[in-house]
Amino acid sequence: MTVVAPDETPLAHQRQQRLRLWLLLAPGALWLFFFFVLPLLIVMLYSFATPGPTGNVIWQFNFDSYITLIGKDLYFNAYYRSLWVGLQTTVICLLVGYPLALYMTLAEPKQRNLLLFLVLIPFWTNFLVRTYAWMIILSNNGLINDLLQWLGFAKQLLYPSAGAVLVGLIYGNLPFMVLPLFASLARFDFTLMEASADLGAGRWRSFWRIMFPLTVPGVVAGSVLVFIPTVGQFVVSDLLGGSKVDLLGNLLQRLFTRSNPPNWPLGSALALVFMFVLTLIVIIYFRTTTEEDR
Amino acid sequence: MHVTNTSAVVLQQVTKRFQNVTAVDAIDLDIRDGEFFSMLGPSGCGKTTTLRMIAGFEFPSSGVISLAGAQVEKVPAHLRNVNTVFQSYALFPHMTVAENIAFGLEMKNVPRADIKPRVDAALAMVQLGNYGARRPKQLSGGQQQRVALARALVNRPKVLLLDEPLGALDLKLRKEMQIELKRLQQEVGITFIYVTHDQEEALTMSDRIAVMHQGKLLQVGSPTEIYERPSSRFVADFIGEANFIDGVVTDIGAPYCTVRASNGLELKGMLQGASSVGAAVTIAIRPEKLRLTMQAPENVFTLAAKVEQVVYIGSDTRLTVRLSDTITLDVWEQNNRSTLDRDAYWQRGEQGFVTWNPDNALILTA
C-alpha cells in the first residue's frame, strides 16, 4: 500500500512528477537545441550551398562540395592521416596510461592523491602555452638537443615534425586516458587477481583474462575521450608540425578562414563526412568491446 | 619436527613481519593428510596471514613451509597445488558459473574434452547442476559460496584453504553449510584448512583446532581437548565460557594440586603444565561443570555460596553465585530435573552449596 495525500490522486501525482522532470531537463535541452542541433542543421545546409567569389555563401543547392571531396586525394589523405594520428595517440596513451593508472590505484591513499593532483596540474595552464613549451623543449636550441649535444651526439631536427605533433598530442591527452582508467581500476576487486593466481594463472594471463576484461569500460571511455578530440584538433599539428603535417582540422580551419576566398560549403561537407566516419568508428568500437558484458 | 609422508602441510618456525609488526611469530604446525584443520582466533591474531602464506599470496619473512613433503615457501601461488575459497568468494563477475569453475582446469591445460565433464561433476557435487550458464551476480550468497567451493575443488588440490568462507551468510544458512562442508570434506578426502573466528564453527567441523593469539600458536588439539583441557587462560576464555580464580600454588600432588585463592580458600584442581609451590596460577572451571545444591553434599569438597543472579533461558538456568567478597562463579544448570524439585528453581538471595569434580578444575600457569 502506498500512502497518498488526501488531495492528491495517484494520477495527479504522476503528472506532477512528469512536469518536474521536464522542468529539470529544459535548460539542458534548450542549450543543446540552440547551440548544437541548430548550428549542425546550418552546417548541413551550407554543405549543399554554393561558394561565392568573396567567401560568401550563395543559396543555390547542389552536391558539388561532396563531389569535390570524393574527387581529390588531398581530402582523402587528410582523413587518413588524421585517423592514423588519432589511432597512434590513443594507443600510446593507453600503453602509457594503463600502467600509470594501475600504479595510482595500488599506491597508498596519500601518494595516490598526490599522483592524481600531478595528473591534473597541467589543466591549470592554458593548452596553447603548454604546446608552446613543447616547441621550446624540442627546438634546435632546446632542452633535448642541448642534452644530446652534451652527451656528444649530433643535434637532431625534432621540431617541426610529425613526431613532435605526436608528442604534443600524447602529452595533452594523457589525462583523459588516465582518469577513466583510474576510475575503472579503483572499482576493480584485486582479490580476483589472487583468485586467478590461486587457480594457476600467472601474472600475464591473470591480467588478460581477469583485470583487462573487467576494466574495458575505462579503456573504452579513455580511448574515445582521446581519439575524438585528437582527430579533429588543429592547434597542435599547426604549432608543432609547422605546415608539414596537414590534418583534417588544419584543412577545415583553412577552408573556413584562411584560404582565398574561404569555401564554407566545402568545409561544411568535409566536417559532416568526417563526423559521420567518426560516429561509425565509435559505434563499431563500442559494439566490439562491450559485447561480452551484455 | 620432522616431515612424515602423512603430513599435508608442515610449517616450521614460520614468521611474517609487516614493517615492524610481527603478524605471525615462529609457528610450528603439522597438518595431517585428509584432516579438517581449523585455525581459530580473534581478528588480527595472524590466522589469515598464515593461510595466505600457505596459499602463496604472502611469503614468510623466515621459516619453512612444506606441501606434501616439498618445500614451497618461495613458490608463487599459481604454481602451488592448493586452492582457496575466499571470504568474499572472489568469483569472476564477467564469466558464467561454468566458466568460473573451468578457469583453473584451463590454466592447467587440461584437455577441453575433459573440462566439461569435470565442471558438470563439480556443479553436481555442490548441488548447482542447472546453474552453469548463470552469472555469479544472479546467484544468492549461499549459491555463490557453493560455486567458490566447486571452483576450488574441481582442481583436486592437495589442500583446500578456506578463509572464513561462511562469514557473509546468515546464521541458519551458516549452520547448514557447516554440515555440508564437513560432509564434502569427508567425501573428497582433501585436507581442509579452515580459518575462522567463530569457536562454535571450529568445534562443529574440525578434526583438530589450532588456537592463535597475537601471532602465536597457543594450542593445537581436538575440539574436546581444546574445550576440556585448555592450556592457557586465553584459550579457556576464547573457547566457550569459564570462571577464573587467581591464586598461589600451596601443594603439588598427584593427581590434584592445591591452590590458595586470594580470599584464603583452598581449592583443588588438575595442573596443566608444570608449576611449583608459591607460583601464581589461575583456576579455570567451566560453568556447566559446577553444581549448586540446597544441602551440602557429604564427603565431597564443597563451598557455601549465595545466589546473586538467576537467568532462565529455557533449556538452561544461568546463575551467578558469590563465594566471597571477591569471588563470584557462573553456574549453568540444565533444566532436566523434575518440575517439583525445589533445587531446580533458585531465587535471588538464597544460600546454597557449590560442588565440582576437581578433574574439571584446571590450574593454568599461562
Image: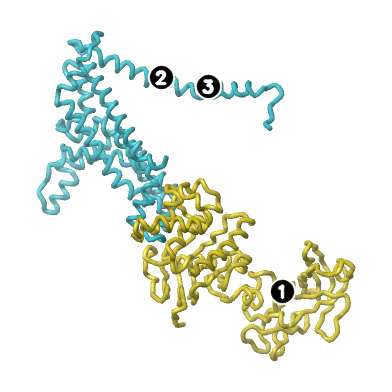
Number of marks present in the image shown: 3
Describe residue B332's horizontal placement relative to residue B125 as left or right. right
Q: CA distance from mark 2 to mark 1?
A: 79 Å
Q: Secondary structure at mark 2?
A: helix
Camera-nearest residue between B250 and B97? B97
User: Residue B8: x, y in percent?
Assistant: 46, 74
Asked if residue A109 shows in the view, the reply is no
Please say if B342 is above or below A19: below
Tell me the chain of label 1: B
Is A85 left, or right, of A212 in this rendering?
A: left
Residue identifier under label 3: A23
Find residue B309 and report its horizontal and vertical position in percent.
Answer: 81, 66
Quarter of the image with the C terminus of chain A in it: top left
Residue A117 placed where, x, y %? 39, 45
Quarter of the figure with residue B329: bottom right
Q: Earlier in the sequence, mark 2 or mark 3?
A: 3
From the viewer's side, name the closer residue of B312 and A36: B312
- Residue at point 42%, 73% (across, down): B67
Chain letter of mark 2 equals A
What kind of residue is marked 2?
Phe
| Residue B24, numbered label | none
Position of residue A28 relative to residue B121, above or below, is above
Mark 1, other Cα within 10 Å: few <14 / some 14–19 / many ≥20: many
User: Image point 23% across, 9% down: which residue?
Assistant: A58
Q: Which residue is mark 1?
A: B286
Chain letter for cyan?
A: A
- Within-10-Å neighbours for mark 2: few <14, some 14–19, many 20+: few
Visual hue assigned to chain B: yellow
